[in-house]
Image (cartoon, rainbow, N blue to C red):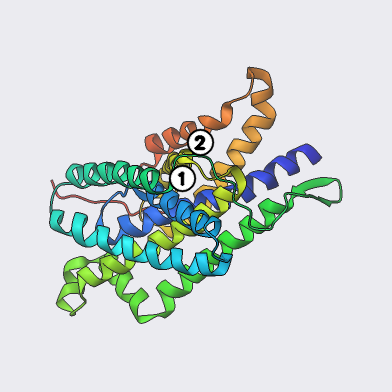
Amino acid sequence: MTLFLEALIGGLLAGTMYSLVAIGFVLIFKASGVFNYAQGAMLLFSALTLVSLNEFGFPFWAALVMTIIITVIGAILIERIVLRPLANRNVMTLFMATLGLAYVIEGMAQGIMGAEIRGFDVGIEDLPIFWGDILISQFDLVAAAVAITMVAILALFFNKTRIGISLRAVADDTAAAQTLGININRIWQIVWAVAALTGLVAGMAWGARQGISFTLSLVVLKALPVLIIGGFTSIGGAIVAGLIVGASEALAETYIGVHIGGGIVTWVAYFVAIGFLFYRPSGLFGDIEIERV
C-alpha cells in the first residue's frame, strides 16, 4: 500500500505540471478555435530568455519582469502578424501556421541564445519528505503548489474580471459577443498573452526539474493526451486530465513497467487517450459539437 500511495501521490503532483502546460492550449483553442502547436516553442523561448538574462547578470526578479514583458509583447505580435491575417481560414491552415511558427521560434531562440543545455536553479532542493512511511518530493510539492496557484488566479481572472467575462463570452459565442460591442481582436491578443504567461510558469517548473534545452519544447507532446482526455475547451478538464495522466504514468511504470523493461511512461498516456477517443471523443468536459445534417 505504501508503494501504491507513493506512486499515486507522485503521479498526481507531476500531473499538475501537465495541466499547466495544457491550459495554455485550452485558452487559445477555446477563444479562437486555433490549436496552437507553437505553445511548446513559446514555453521554451520564455524559459531560455529568463535563464539567459539571469546569466547575463540581471537579478532573478529583474530577469523575470523583463521576461514577462518580452513574452507578452511576443505573444501579441504573433497574434497580430501571423494569426489575424489568417482569420476565417480552415482549421488545417491555422494548424500548419502554428506548426511553422514553432520551428521559427525555436530557430530564433537557438540563434540568439545558443543550443546548449542550461541549468535553472530556482532555489528549491529536491529533498525527500516523509509523510509517515510515504516518500514525497519537496520539489514536486512546490511545483504543484505553483500550478494550483496559477490555476486559481486564472479562475478568478475569468470569473471575476470584466475582461475575463468578455473572454468567456467570446468563447461561448463569437458572433453574439461582437453584437454586444466586444472587441474580438483585443480579446484574442489578451488570450495569447495569458497563454504565453502560463507557458512561462510551466517552462520555469519544467526547466528547474530537467534543465532548459530544446527538448523542453517537446513538452507539447505531454499536453496532447491531457487535452484529449479533458477536452480541448475546458480548463477544468485540463486540470482533471493532467491528474489522470500523471497518476496513470506513475502507477503503470510502478506495476507494469518493471515487467516489460520500463519506458512505459512515454506511451501509456496515449493509450488512455485513444480509449477516450473511442468512447468519449469530446473528452471529459469538452463541448460536444452538434451539427445539422
Mark 1, secondary structure of its residue: helix
Q: Position of residue 287 (x, y in %)?
A: 33, 54
Q: Is residue 8 positioned above or below 254 on the image?
A: below
Give the residue at x 47% y 58%. Answer: 200
Q: Is residue 201 left or right of residue 260?
A: left
Can residue 1 be seen at all in this image of the molecule?
no
**Residue shown at 32%/58% (left/top)?**
28
Seen at 28% across and 42% down, the residue is 99
Res 244 seen here: yes
Of the residues under marks 1 and 2, which one precedes in the sequence?
1
Check disc 2: other Cα within 10 Å, few if <14, some if 14-19, many if 20+: many
Which residue sits at x=24%, y=72%?
186
Name the kind of residue labelled 1 in the image: Val
Q: CA distance from mark 1 to mark 2?
A: 8 Å
Q: Which residue is denoted by mark 2 in the rendering?
A: 269
Pick the front one: 40 or 136: 40
Q: State left or right for residue 276 relative to residue 122.
A: left
Residue 267 location (% of width, % of height): 50, 29
- Can you say which quadrant of the picture contains the C terminus? top left
The reply to whether the C-beta atoms of the residues labelled 1 and 2 are less than 8 Å apart is: yes
According to the picture, the residue beneath numbered tag 1 turns out to be: 226
Residue type at mark 2: give it: Ala
- Left or right? Give the position of 36 relative to 175: right
